[in-house]
Image (cartoon, rainbow, N blue to C red):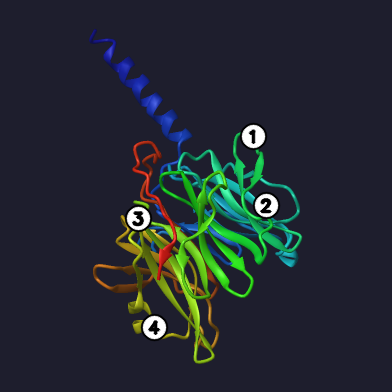
Amino acid sequence: MKHLKPVFLLVAITFLYSFCSLVPIVDAKIVFRIGSDIYVMNDDGSNRRQLTKNTVSTDRHPRWSHDGQRIAFTRIMDKKLSQTSGELFFMNTDGTNVQRLTDDNVSDNYPSWSPDGKKIAFRKRLGGQSEVHVIDLATRNVTQLTGLAGAEGELGSTAPDWSPDGTEIIYEKFIKDRGKDIYVMSSDGEDQRPLFDSEPSMMFFPRWSANGKRILFDDCTWEDDRQRCRLTIATIRGRTHQINEIYDKLGDNLLVGIMCWMDNDSAILLDLKLLDKPKPNYDIYYYNFNKQSLKRLTSGEENEKNPDWIEGPLPVSPQGKKKVTWGTLKQ
């Protein structure tokens, strides 16, 4: 038996090495883009690494899969044709094994993984109108979810985000004479309904919290002939809260792009640009709710934007998650 121990140890080491080589380990938790390419970095903005390198194309809107093993993104195949040449791709977390998901010569954008990693919801722009679709990764079959009924006044839907329990998708809907509202539907496209019963406004980029009980979005209204935007959180009980501290620190003359939850919903990441700068460009910021602190993580000359955060490499499964039902919230 003494002679067998080194053999067992060698087999164990070989197995572990093989397993680790097959499954990329997530250390950097923030994925984002600089200019035309996708990068990752640590939570404090350090140790940034480039994953893609483009010359004629542009990569946008990267999203982690829930198990932390893949990154979905949009690749604009021709920078001169950004409205019609966006295709969906995914890759390993180290930038290897890049695979193309769509090839339809239209604009496919804003990917969002299902919690089980089997499907991706996204926005497809076809014939000048955007609608939410879902692609099955195993079969590559694409299913349209919105815009099928042809309801009067509906001008398209975009920016889907899958709920943590996998049962619902939240998204923007553009409605004539109202602006953009936040809608929610079942993951199969049924039961489409507005999240709010509110006055017309422009609501952008809704994102579920990790527990499914809060939704983060950008809410813009017109005041004194100018647009006033506030990052806003809606709760399952129908309450909304504006994150005014960011604007208290930076002023109102700013434009927010993409945002996401972070640190067990105690913080958010967002990209924004200060419009009063001589050459405004997007940078990524970290905001902590408990400390009411705002920290800029990037400061380059190019646009640094589209952040997404992953909790860690542990798999996330919708099984065992409690169902959270969202209806129309009164404001």
Amino acid type at image mark 2: Leu
Identify the mark at residue 148; answer none if there is no mark. Answer: 2
Q: Residue at x 53, y 62 (%)?
A: 33
Residue ID for mark 4 = 250
Judge from the rendering whether residue 279 lies leftward or rightward of residue 82; answer left or right: left
Q: Are marks 1 and 2 in contact (CB under 8 Å)?
A: no
Q: CA distance from mark 4 to mark 3?
A: 28 Å
Residue ID for mark 1 = 139
Residue 39 picture location, percent across and down: 51, 58
Judge from the rendering whether residue 295 lies leftward or rightward of residue 117; answer left or right: left
Provide the secondary structure element on which disc 3 rests.
loop
Q: Residue at x 29, y 61 (%)?
A: 266
Residue ID for mark 3 = 213
Provide the secondary structure element on which disc 2 rests.
loop
Q: CA distance from mark 1 to mark 2?
A: 22 Å
Of circles 3 and 2, the one toward us is 2
Of circles 1 and 3, the one toward us is 3
Mark 1 packing: few (<14 Cα in 10 Å), some, or many (20+)? Answer: few
Amino acid type at image mark 3: Lys
Amino acid type at image mark 1: Thr
Of circles 4 and 3, the one toward us is 3
